[in-house]
Image (cartoon, rainbow, N blue to C red):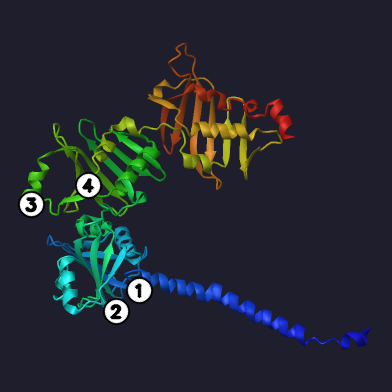
Amino acid sequence: MTSEIAKVNWKPQFFLALLLFIGGSFVYWYEFKHKPSIESEETNTSHLVSLDGKRIKGFSIKSSNKKVLDVQCESEQGCFIDARANWKVAVPINVIGDRSNINSFLNSLKTLKASETIDLSSDDKGKQISLFKEYGIDSEKNASIHSDLIKIDIADDESILMLKGATHPVGNKIFVAITRGDKILTDQILLLPSFFNRHFERSVTHWRDKKIFNLAVEDILGVSISARGKSKVVLNRDENTWLISDKNEKYPAEATVIEGLLNSITFTNAKEFLKENKYTADAKKLIKNYRREATISLNLKDGGIEKFELFSKKPGEKEKSSILISSKLDPIYEVDSTFPEKFAKSAVDFRMKRLISSSERFNVSKVEVKTGKEAFQITKNESNWTWNENLPLDADKVNSLLDAMSSDQILDTLDPKTLPKGESVSLLLKSENDQTLKRIEFWKVDTSSKEKSGLIAKLQYSERSQVFSIDKRLDNAIPWTKETLKPTQENHVDRK
């Protein structure tokens, strides 16, 4: 048997395996290396402007209405087209550029394709010049003095110019010539989609950064609002809690409402820059057409103060319009017409509606409960709640209690003197690291009126406290006794 195996000629199988290996390697190289490279080259060739992987120093847009725009990269090496690029508008005004809009413009050029190419290579020079003039481009002049053009300056490369000509009589397409340097090549003319015109029609506002305040919510420690027809509201942050300052008293405010308002400030953008300098005579004349709606002052973490005023068009004006004037910034900004409405608030609009915030609700890891007859503790263990005693516990009831306290349950703010003298239930909410989050005490109140609540809660914060009337639907969730948190017989059987 061994001698028969030894006589077998393995050379054909070896060469066949080698042939299969070589063939497989070629197919892999062609499909996954060579073919994608060729397709990429063909794609780049079909695009009018090749900007892939190139650093761009800047670009300029000149239109026939004598508007000139010049945008430059902040880096001397040039910018790639990505979210890290920093641009500035240098002409007609020196301001920070709108990164998103500028990158979008360059990406649109990078992927731009001609709807049609008219080949003029077989025509003589005189006919080419004549046809170009018909197309709205004087090819005998220097390209850089053409009335409508886009010029892109690429680092370590020639500039790319796109010269816009007339509109085609059929289909509203645009005649365009593209060249490198200042020499116009007359062997072809391109027809581009009509949307190419938009780049020449945009105002400088489109290209400049429209963010008004360079702030984050966490940078703001206090805010005061003086709205037209309302009393002044003063709000201050104390660690993770917001407080309303009313005369000589301070009491907790609804953090979600305040932070929502602050977010609207930090994210607000200018719709338009109506005047670059609020101190000019024209600017002052413009302001007279508006009515002051609110004055807002922000106390910042770095000790600074940011103050701004909001105005709306006076009653009777057909067009709704609102403007913002900052104490530290020169322009008069047009903002969304509804923006001043967000600040038409009094202190009552910021009063607490929830006993605990959403973040506190999910940070609670321990609850110490004291009633008139007993004291016990429940602790969160991963996703379950357990007693400090060996007793069955319905974790769903604990979660329902926390959910109820973090929803809108506060009906009204009461005078601390109205606290009843009967038995109460005290809840001390703590985080995982044993930090006290909130101390809340509940009382039941006998009332014959269906409109009045039968619950009162005292919220203790640091050395201050506030008393509230609470929605009586919270009654069933409050652990008046241990029995409240024990599972029902049915649930106890299901858990087993």
Query: Residue 123 bears which disc, if any?
Result: none
Residue 333 coordinates in the image, percent (x, y): 19, 49
Contact (Cβ within 8 Å) of mark 3 with mark 1 = no
Closer to the chain start, of discs 4 and 2, is 2
Q: Residues within 10 Å of mark 1 (few under 14, many from 20)?
A: some
Q: Quadrant of residue 121?
A: bottom left
Residue situated in front as seen by the camera: 61 or 193: 193
Whole-number angstrom distance, CA of label 1 to CA of label 2: 9 Å
Closer to the chain start, of discs 3 and 1, is 1
Residue 341 in view, yes or no: yes
Residue behind mark 4: 307
Contact (Cβ within 8 Å) of mark 3 with mark 4 = no
Query: Residue 280 bears which disc, if any?
Result: 3
Closer to the chain start, of discs 1 and 2, is 1
Residue 184 coordinates in the image, percent (x, y): 21, 76
Residue behind mark 2: 157
Residue 219 coordinates in the image, percent (x, y): 34, 51
Amino acid beneath label 1: Lys
Amino acid beneath label 3: Thr
Q: Residues within 10 Å of mark 2 (few under 14, many from 20)?
A: few
Residue situated in front as seen by the camera: 87 or 354: 87
